[in-house]
Amino acid sequence: MSALLGYTLRAALLRRASRDFRHLFPHLPQRSGCNNQLRAASGLITGMIRMLATDTSLWGDDAWAVDSTPVGCGCWRETAKRADLAGRGQYGYCASNLRSRPAPIDIAATTGGTDMNRLEGRAALVTGSTSGIGRGVAEAMAREGAVVVVTGLGPELGARVVDGIVAEGGTAHYVEADLSAGGSEVRRLAQEATALAGRPIDILVNNAAFLVPPHPMTESTEEQIDQVLEVNVKAPYLLTAALVPGMVEHGGGSVINIGSIGGVDGIKFTSLYGASKAGLHSLTRSWAAELAADGVRVNTVAPGPTITEGNEDLRPLLETLAEGNPDRRTGTVQDTAAAVIFLASEEASHIHGVLLPVDGGALAI
């Protein structure tokens, strides 16, 4: 009952905020303009929405309070200070009162599963798809009817992903490619992926990323800087440039960059990785402005702490970080894959240049 009352109150407040907008700001003309005033007014409304999204008194059955802020996949904040907080979170709630985390949603059950075929007749290339989030995205796209080109390092891993997709009735191919090897290798990948798919690539998911352990910025080497920027920024740039002409020629397509909330928040000891993801986020906005008129949509999905088969050893740390999220759980590969499928589908045909966090609300607080 408390949860129902919370939802009802929240909805009522949002309706009231919308209805009273003009009463609060009667001097705003009924036309576009007065940008500073409109932004200020919109900021107030946005602030109310964020407050309502995280206010435990309105949600009723939720409680949250920890001292650290969740961050992007592959990064984490220092959490040693937790032991000094004597059970109190950053926002004054008692962390010991956290209830059990809600279970992840069954994506197949809530979206119609394999019967949707939202990507039927399309070809998709997913970089870094031999494991982790990339693999989950490739498998989900195949279930939605796309012909998927898997790429990464390691033919055994690639074969495992392809065989799994084929066993479920999908179609997939594998191309070995090292995205740190420069432009010629990236362009070869574009050509071979197109040839294997038998048609121009309709959907490109720039997922591959080079990670370095968190470290002080004074300890970054030139080699690390070059590797991170080569894979995380240069390779997506060149690969997108190689595939977009085919998309445009055949009526459009979709580019989805896998970013990170680490590219939005300033996170200690992760400046190199965060800068590369922030750069990718910027490319999303610029490409969206440039390519929308040609029928190519470009968007970003930004995961928060996400558990994959490759980071199970970090599960306790990731779960601790995720306790600071409004939904108090870590992300799953399926969470990110569902967001990518949506943005790749016609359901998102009017969405350009967005950064969609899949972070349990971490960036909302």
Image (cartoon, rainbow, N blue to C red):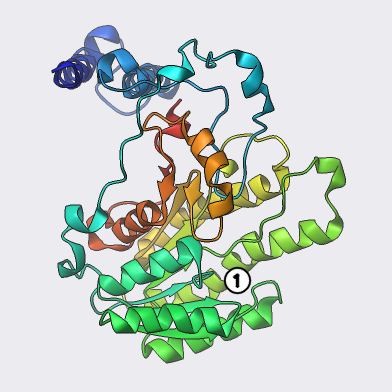
Q: Amino acid at mark 1?
A: Leu
Q: Residue at x 33, y 17 (%)?
A: 56
Q: Is residue 252 visible?
A: no
Q: Is 234 left or right of 135, judged from the image as shown?
A: right
Residue 25 falls in image quadrant: top left
The answer to whether 124 is drawn above or below residue 279 in the figure is: below
Q: Is 87 left or right of 212, judged from the image as shown?
A: left
Q: Secondary structure at mark 1?
A: helix
The answer to whether 64 is drawn above or below residue 282 in the figure is: above
Where is the N terminus found, in terms of image quarters? top left
Q: Residue at x 67, y 83 (%)?
A: 184
Circle 1 residue: 238
Give 330 or 348, whichever is nearer the viewer: 330
Give 23 or 93, whichever is nearer the viewer: 93
Name the spot of residue 123 as percent of width and height, x first: 35, 78
Give 143 or 86, whichever is nearer the viewer: 86
Give 313 or 330, whichever is nearer the viewer: 313
Q: Residue at x 43, y 29 (%)?
A: 364
The answer to whether 303 is drawn above or below residue 99 in the figure is: below
Name the spot of residue 211 as percent of width and height, x first: 67, 56
Name the spot of residue 99 as percent of width and height, x first: 35, 25
